[in-house]
Amino acid sequence: PLEKLQIKWYKGLLGVNRKATNIAVLAELGKYPVAIDIATNLIKYWLRIVNFDSSALIYECYTDNVLLLQGQNKCWLKAVREILYATGFHQVWLDQNTQDKTHLASDVREKLEEIYQEQWKLDLWDDPRADNSQGNKLRTYRRFKEEHKMELYLTKVKDTKTRKDITRLRISAHSLEIEKGRYLMKPIEERKC
């Protein structure tokens, strides 16, 4: 639900319709899914707790949660463990008292962004139909969008209508025949203006 709200906000900001491709919307703005912020904040919270004095009540609650996790019960620590494993920091989970955690939250965030960028590139180049009759909606976009970063025109073009038109054209969120024909299942070569 939170990611849907984030995407809806960004689509409104860019002035594109709800059918605009989410990965292109995020890429135009140089933004990442809000799940990365949530995961990073979860790691920061975990770091605060594990650094408490062992006699503190919150640390006692933490050790109870560790026991819950070991018993295969659901608890928030499972998410912490999965994030650390997914980002290559499993050793920090295994040796919680001996590992240097000074930059852990920022390192985890950096790794999550790197993983997202790799998936973004794969999705950008993914042509799901074997016969390529319809092709990837972003086949034009991927010709000039090489990096996941905010595009300069978004800050340089002052006229709102022009900026929105540029965005719509770039991410195929326009009403030209090449896009409208997609929903009518027309072959690409027949979608002419």
Image (cartoon, rainbow, N blue to C red):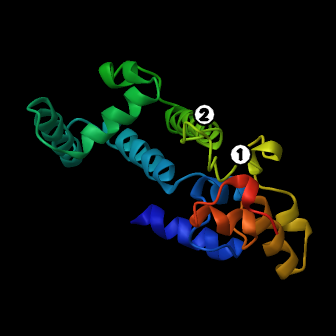
Q: Mark 2: give few (<14), some (14-19) or many (20+) Cα within 10 Å.
A: few
Q: Secondary structure at mark 2?
A: helix
Amino acid carrying label 1: it is His
> Could you tell me if residue 47 is visible in this image?
yes
- Which mark identifies residue 148? 1
Q: Secondary structure at mark 1?
A: loop
Q: Is residue 124 left or right of residue 87?
A: right
Kindly identify the residue that appears in the image at 43 percent across and 46 percent down. 39
Kindly identify the residue that appears in the image at 47 percent across and 45 percent down. 40
Instruction: Residue 140: give x, y in percent of width and height.
Output: 77, 50
- Which mark identifies residue 124? none
Kindly identify the residue that appears in the image at 62 percent across and 65 percent down. 20
Instruction: Residue 142: give x, y in percent of width and height.
Output: 75, 44
Q: Quadrant of residue 191?
A: bottom right
Q: Is residue 175 left or right of residue 193?
A: left
Q: Quadrant of residue 130?
A: top right
The C terminus - image quarter:
bottom right
Q: Quadrant of residue 75?
A: top left
Q: Mark 1: give few (<14), some (14-19) or many (20+) Cα within 10 Å.
A: many
